[in-house]
Amino acid sequence: MTESSKKNILVLNGPNLNMLGTREPEIYGSETLEDIEINMTARAEKLGYILDFRQTNSESELVGWIQQARNKTSAILLNAGAFTHTSVAILDALQAVDMPVIELHLSNIFKREKFRHHSYVSPAANGVICGFGGNSYILALEAAHNILSND
Ligand code: CA2
């Protein structure tokens, strides 16, 4: 496959995910976000995608990136971190883009505190993957590939 025929997939990471691997390995695993990016990029390459992998602590930046994804990317994989449980702005931005959206989490948010059980992002997502640590990212990529292959 030539570089120009590959599709882009945008992977967005929200607040504090840059701290992965430094604390709470029992909840989030011991991989760093960079480890996850490296593993995911290798899998994406095999499936024929170019990954655009980003992290920000800013809600406004996440909204901006989602808006800019229109016509530039074929799917969005999103771990919105704590904004998952608070952000109507991210929900609104996702609802304005016409492409597959996979919500993902490292931890099983339903096994944790009650406030993590509700996601503002889920109504805009094709599906949600959570609880598999760094592998949640690979599973989300495979889910997006499945949707895009059947389009
Ligand atoms: O399980 C997930 O992926 C979460 O999206 C992670 C968020 C949390 O607020 C969500 O409820 C579930 C938190 C990410 C912060 O991760 C850290 C990891 C190590 C050290 C500090 C923060």
Image (spheres, grey):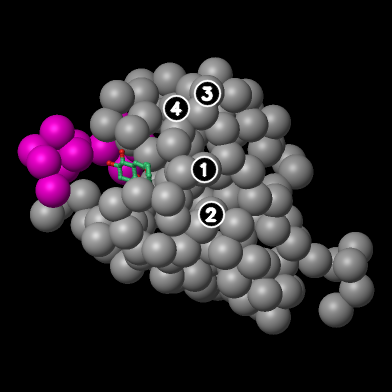
Structural distance between the alpha carbons of marks 1 and 2: 6 Å
Q: CA distance from mark 4 to mark 1?
A: 19 Å
* Within-10-Å neighbours for mark 4: few <14, some 14–19, many 20+: many
Label 4 – label 3 distance at C-alpha: 11 Å
Nearest to N terminus: mark 1 or mark 2? 1
Q: Which residue is mark 2?
A: 33
Query: In which quadrant of the rendered view does residue 151 lie?
Result: bottom right
Q: Amino acid at mark 4?
A: Ile
Mark 1 vs mark 3: give the one in front: 1
- Whole-angstrom CA distance, mark 1 to mark 3, is 12 Å
How far apart marks 2 and 3 lie (CA) works out to 17 Å
Give the residue type at disc 1: Asn
Give the SS element for disc 2.
helix
Q: Nearer the viewer, mark 4 or mark 1?
A: 1
The residue beneath circle 4 is 90
Numbered badge on residue 18: 1
Task: Work out whether residue 75 or residue 54 is closer to the camera in this orientation and state it.
Answer: 54
Residue 128 is at least partly visible in this image:
no
Query: Residue placed at 59% from the left, 24% from the top?
Result: 61
C-beta proximity under 8 Å, tags 1 and 2: yes
Question: Seen from this angle, which residue lies furthest front?
Answer: 22
Looking at the image, tell me whether mark 2 or mark 3 is earlier in sequence order: 2
Q: Is residue 3 visible?
A: yes
Mark 1 closeness class: few <14, some 14–19, many ≥20 residues within 10 Å: some
Give me the disc on residue 58: 3
Q: Of tags 4 and 3, which is closer to the observer?
A: 3
